[in-house]
Every structure is written in structure tokens, then in C-alpha cells.
Amino acid sequence: EVQLLESGGGLVQPGGSLRLSCAASGFTFSNYAMNWVRQGPGKGLEWVSTISGGGGSAYYADSVKGRFTISRDNSKNTQYLQMNSLRVEDTAVYYCASADTLAFWGQGTLVTVSS
Amino acid sequence: DIQMTQSPSSLSASVADRVTITCRASQGIRNDLGWYQQKPGKAPKRLIYAASSLQSGVPSRFSGSGSGTEFTLTISSLQPEDFATYYCLQHNTYPRTFGQGTKVEIK
């Protein structure tokens, strides 16, 4: 059974940083791309970033490019999202999702950016 | 960027009704499309992949069709547990893009 467990969310001031983690199990982690998707309060789903299975390729939404960095550690079956220069508009539940097709999702972690 | 235009944005329906939701892509995406169901406070759950393939464990009343630019999610007989918000997602090109969502409410 595929399981994805996000952690690392919390309250941070504008301009601050946060690192999210997503621990995966139930599949061969290194064979699959991984993704981050977010959902602002009362809003729809927004794709944030994708990293390839080997970690050599990464893609970002324009809204986070230059501020967020996706990475993964295949020895730990974990992916990360380093979020810098956070803005109020980055407030959202952040989900990790597996594979190019976003097949399975974690339960999400809440990031609140507020002074 | 590929725009995904989903309609309607909301609908009211009764149990046992047939419901159809549409997504239109601004350019061809072959069949690189998934449909997701999200209930309040929960993570999205994929129902359909590759435009028309049913995810394992998903009831057969859900079906998907389409290719290229026009896609449809159909619920053949709406059940009480189906009241939720539905999203389409294209994974043909980056950036990945979602439809705006369709909220299915009880009439």
C-alpha cells in the first residue's frame, strides 16, 4: 500500500523559511517522480513542483521559481521542499503526490505565512 | 501554459442522478489527464487516469472519456458519498495544470 506522509508545516513570518518533508513507503521510491501541490484556503489545487526519480530534473511553477527548491533522498525514501522568502500568499495546505501522473497523495501539511 | 477549463463550477443534483463534468484543454494533451475527488478537509483522491482508466478500488459508476482537448467525467448514478469537489489535471506538459474544480452539491 502506498503511503505518503508530509511533515514540517507550521507558522512562519513573511520572508521566513520552512522545509517540508514527505516520507514515502509501499513502492520503489527511486523509480518515480514526486510532486508538491498546494491548496490555499478556500481555493483550488495548484501544482508547485516536480522532481524526477533520480533527482536530476526539477520543474517549478512560476509563482515559486527562485524561492522554492525541491529535492529528494532516495536512500531515505523522502522528498523535500525548501521554501524561502515566504509570502502571505504561500499560505496553503501542501500535499506531496507520487509519480508523473500524481497517482497517490499524502494527507497534507499546513503552512501559514503571517506576521 | 496549458489552460484547463472545467465546467460547470458547481452543480446541484439528487441521489441516482447522472452527472457529467467537462474539462477542455487549451491545446492537445493526448490522454494525459486524471480526474480527482476531494472531500472537505481531505486530500484529493484519483478516480480516473489516462483519461478513461478506472483507478483500482473506485466504483464503476465513475467513468471518463475523451482525448486531445475535450474530456468528460461521468457519474452514472450519484450516491450520497459522491458529494464532493472534482478536479481534472493535465500531466502532458509543465507546468501541470488543474481545472478550477466542480462542486457537486445535494439538491
Image (cartoon, rainbow, N blue to C red):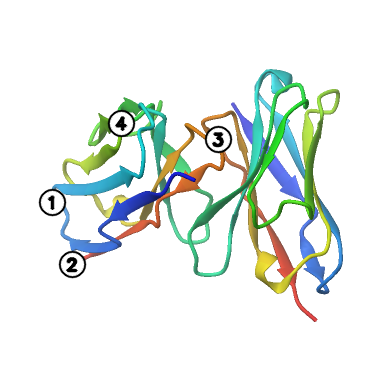
Tell which circle, 4 or 2, labels the residue nearer the N-terminal end.
Answer: 4
User: Residue A23, image x and y in percent?
Assistant: 75, 37
Name the subunit of mark 1.
B
Separation of marks 2 and 1 at Cα, in angstroms:
10 Å
Write the residue at 70% across / 42% down. Answer: A5
Write the residue at 56% across / 38% down. Answer: B94
Q: Are marks 3 and 2 on the same chain?
A: no
User: Residue B24, image x and y in percent?
Assistant: 30, 45
Q: Is residue B97 left or right of residue A110?
A: left
Please tell me how crowded label 3 is: few (under 14), some (14-19), or many (20+) other residues with Cα within 10 Å: some
Q: Are marks 1 and 4 in contact (CB under 8 Å)?
A: no
> Could you say which disc has been placed on residue A104 in the image?
3
Name the subunit of mark 3.
A
Element type at mark 4: loop
Name the subunit of mark 4.
B
Please tell me how crowded label 1 is: few (under 14), some (14-19), or many (20+) other residues with Cα within 10 Å: few
User: Residue B104, image x and y in percent?
Assistant: 28, 59
Tell which circle, 2 or 1, labels the residue nearer the N-terminal end.
Answer: 1
Separation of marks 3 and 2 at Cα, in angstroms:
31 Å
For badge 3, the amino acid type reads Phe
Comparing labels 1 and 4, the label whose residue is closer to the camera? 4
Please tell me how crowded label 2 is: few (under 14), some (14-19), or many (20+) other residues with Cα within 10 Å: few
